[in-house]
Amino acid sequence: MQEPLVFLPGMMCDARVFGPQLTALSPDMAVTIAPITQGDRIEEIASNLLDVLPRKFALAGLSLGGIVAMEVLRRAPDRVSRIALMDTNPLAETPKSSADLEPLIIKARSGNLAEFVSGILQPGVLAPGPGRTEVMALVRDMAEHLGADIILRQVRAMQRRRDYQSVLRRCKTPALVLCGEHDGLTPIKRHKFMAELIPYAELEVIEGAGHLPTLERPDETTQALRTWMKQPLILQ
């Protein structure tokens, strides 16, 4: 029997970031989209999720959701049957990148959430083309729905994250490392590096997509996830 699939959205995103995948995959498997909104640290978010998730599950995380997925894998490798890491980063935050976020955090705290979103998800982060405006509008709406308090906690959690290279080296499950070819936030070379760390990883680059391939190229992303879900489990 196919194990349930759990999606973890990225920062500023709610379940709608996986809307196309939920529609396409739900007829064939149990699909859950678990929010990453409870906790001030990655470790706390992951712990809270493990309290409510199934005993065994496939795990797919996007961006910050991918970082949380790596922490879930670190804490409970026996519960994760397979893992998909999409447009994410296994490295700890650098002092410079953390400092660069501070002006945006001030904007969010002052109530200017729209400028915060625009500063995080600049146009170059997504693929060029007419679909970019629609995706950006959806991200702004998702961010407004979550609210500044949740998003600021997500930013602080991201700033304090650990390095997950050793976790990925120990991963013994079917793994998909996926990214959009135009991702200006977590580029292809970072995903090649990540895929090389994981013993059983497949790298998938989605053409015509940027940091949010689930929305930018939903059909291609869904097909990559289907292929990953069909890979045989690895006997430990």
Image (cartoon, rainbow, N blue to C red):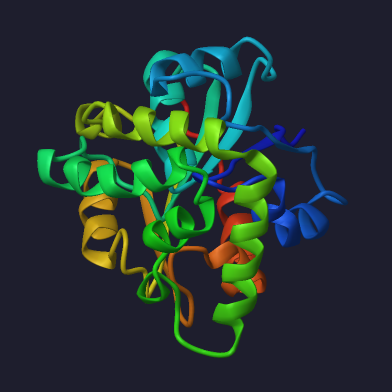
The x and y percentages for residue 182 are 37, 76
Point out the image quarter for the C terminus.
top left
Farthest bottom residue in view: 130
Q: Is residue 30 left or right of residue 214?
A: right
The percent coordinates of residue 109 (x first, y second) are 44, 38
Question: Split into 4 quadrants, where in the image is the N terminus?
Answer: top right
Residue 112 coordinates in the image, percent (x, y): 50, 51
Asked whether 37 or 183 is in front, the reply is 37
x 58%, y 89%: residue: 130
Lateral position of residue 85 relative to residue 144, left or right: left
Q: Is residue 203 left or right of residue 51?
A: left
Q: Toward the viewer: 231 or 36?
A: 36
Q: Is residue 138 above or below residue 217?
A: above
Residue drawn 55% across the image and 79% down it: 132
Residue located farthest toward the front when viewing the structure as drawn: 110
- Number of marks present in the image shown: 0
Residue 181 lies in quadrant: bottom left
Occupied quadrant, residue 122? bottom left
Residue 182 appears in the rendering: yes
Q: In percent of the image, x 66 and y 15: which residue is there?
A: 55
Residue 77: % across, % down? 44, 19
Residue at 58 percent across and 73 percent down: it is: 216
Q: Nearer the viewer, residue 141 or 55?
A: 141
Can the viewer see residue 233? no
In the image as oriented, which residue stretches furthest toward the right?
27
